[in-house]
Image (cartoon, rainbow, N blue to C red):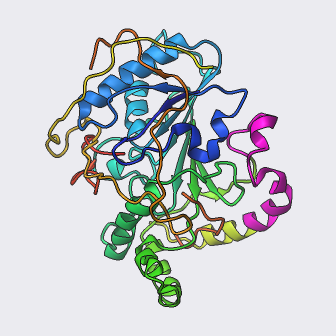
């Protein structure tokens, strides 16, 4: 398991703890692919792609690349550069799991603003996971719906920064397949826009506004093609499957959740570790590229912020990323909590992370 973190100035939770830690449980061994992830600019991302290639080449057998947010740009760069090369690893030996991906083909903010998307036409299987209302990976299809945009911005602060409790095999998730990519949409029960009211103790007001505002927000999204996740998108070995709170109950819950999710989607408007050695990468600080630049956007208006959602303590501290042995490829030379409610009514960089996520110089 090779992990590619997001911007460490925004999310410092170890990658081994993301997605419930399921992908890093034995017999898997998680190895960090180090790159200047706290830096701003395409050079840092390009270094990440170089380091990822070195890590893939140095790791024998079957492997999974797990990438978060800004790490999605790194994966996209690797796929564009190596997926069709004669020396590329066998698709049987390499799978990608990305989450909070700004270049997600359906809903990525970079994709929506012209910054490019993660390819779906390679031989490699990609599982692309997004929490509902995550601004980076679930941007409104209709940005003219300002309420939905405001809710997505709130989702950047409250949703994008927390994937620790996401179960990618939860039967309440919705899935859509395009090429070799499986898009997973994880429902969010409450609108992030109303979270400030809840944190002020005004739950009654938030509860009254929720049924009024949610249909308006959801009308900005095209959820066509999404169906209930009736089978696990990434089957886990027995040791890992035991860590999933939903796996043992899938048989009992799938029928009910599938019926609910299907009816709602149908009504939606069409709209130890491996050791790699290398010189430690140098920190970068680049200005955002001009609008329309084809290089992925990683500007970081992503400032450290409360990385919790309403179900977790507001100021939970998180630690430095140290899944296992941090590794640096030898040839570089330098340089949260998801809800099980169904998604309703609706359908795939400059953001608070950057002021223009269409160009790849900002992301977590």
Q: Position of residue 359 (x, y in %)?
A: 24, 43
The C terminus appears in which quarter of the rendering? Answer: top left
Q: Position of residue 6 (x, y in %)?
A: 40, 40
Q: Position of residue 318 (x, y in %)?
A: 47, 48
Asked where in the image residue 220 lies, by quadrant, the reply is bottom left
Q: Specify whether residue 269 is painted magenta.
A: no
Foreground residue, 226 or 160? 160
Q: Which residue: 48% across, 60% down? A: 308
Q: Which residue: 60% across, 46% down? A: 19
Q: Which residue: 49% across, 54% down? A: 162
| Residue interval drawn in magenta | 232-258
Q: Position of residue 358 (x, y in %)?
A: 26, 48
Q: Specify whether residue 237 is painted magenta.
A: yes
The N terminus appears in which quarter of the rendering? Answer: top right
Asked where in the image residue 22 lies, by quadrant, the reply is top right
Asked if one can make out residue 113 in the rendered structure from this viewpoint, the answer is yes
Foreground residue, 194 or 218? 194
From the viewer's perspective, is 267 left or right of 27? left
């Amino acid at each position: 398991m090779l992990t590619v973190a997001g911007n460490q100035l925004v999310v410092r939770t170890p990658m081994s703890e993301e997605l419930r830690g399921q992908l890093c449980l034995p017999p898997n061994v998680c190895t960090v692919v180090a790159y200047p992830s706290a830096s701003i600019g395409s050079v840092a991302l390009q270094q990440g792609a170089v380091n990822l290639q070195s890590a893939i080449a140095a790791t024998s057998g079957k492997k999974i690349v797990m990438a978060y947010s800004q790490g999605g740009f790194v994966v996209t760069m690797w796929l564009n550069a190596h997926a069709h090369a004669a020396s590329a690893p066998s698709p049987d030996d390499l799978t990608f799991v990305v989450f909070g991906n700004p270049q997600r083909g359906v809903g990525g903010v970079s994709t929506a603003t012209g910054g490019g998307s993660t390819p779906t036409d390679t031989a490699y299987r990609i599982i692309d996971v997004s929490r509902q209302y995550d601004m980076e990976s679930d941007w409104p299809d209709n940005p003219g719906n300002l309420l939905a945009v405001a809710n997505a911005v709130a989702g950047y602060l409250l949703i994008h920064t927390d994937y620790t409790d996401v179960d990618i095999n939860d039967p309440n998730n919705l899935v859509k397949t395009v090429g070799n990519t499986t898009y997973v949409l994880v429902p969010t029960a409450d609108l992030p826009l109303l979270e400030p009211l809840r944190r002020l103790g005004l739950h009654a007001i938030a509860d009254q506004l929720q049924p009024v505002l949610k249909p308006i927000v959801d009308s900005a999204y095209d959820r066509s093609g999404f169906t209930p996740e009736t089978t696990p998108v990434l089957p886990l070995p027995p040791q890992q499957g035991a860590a999933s709170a939903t796996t043992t109950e899938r048989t009992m819950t799938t029928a009910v959740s599938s019926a609910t999710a299907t009816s709602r989607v149908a009504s939606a408007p069409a709209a130890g570790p491996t050791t790699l050695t290398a010189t430690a990468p140098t920190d970068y600080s680049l200005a955002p590229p001009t609008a329309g630049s084809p290089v992925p956007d990683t500007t970081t208006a992503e400032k450290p912020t409360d990385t919790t959602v309403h179900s977790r303590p507001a100021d939970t501290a998180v630690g430095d990323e140290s899944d296992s042995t941090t590794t640096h490829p030898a040839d570089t030379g330098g340089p949260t909590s998801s809800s099980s409610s169904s998604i309703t009514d609706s359908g795939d960089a400059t953001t608070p992370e950057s002021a223009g996520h269409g160009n790849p110089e900002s992301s977590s």
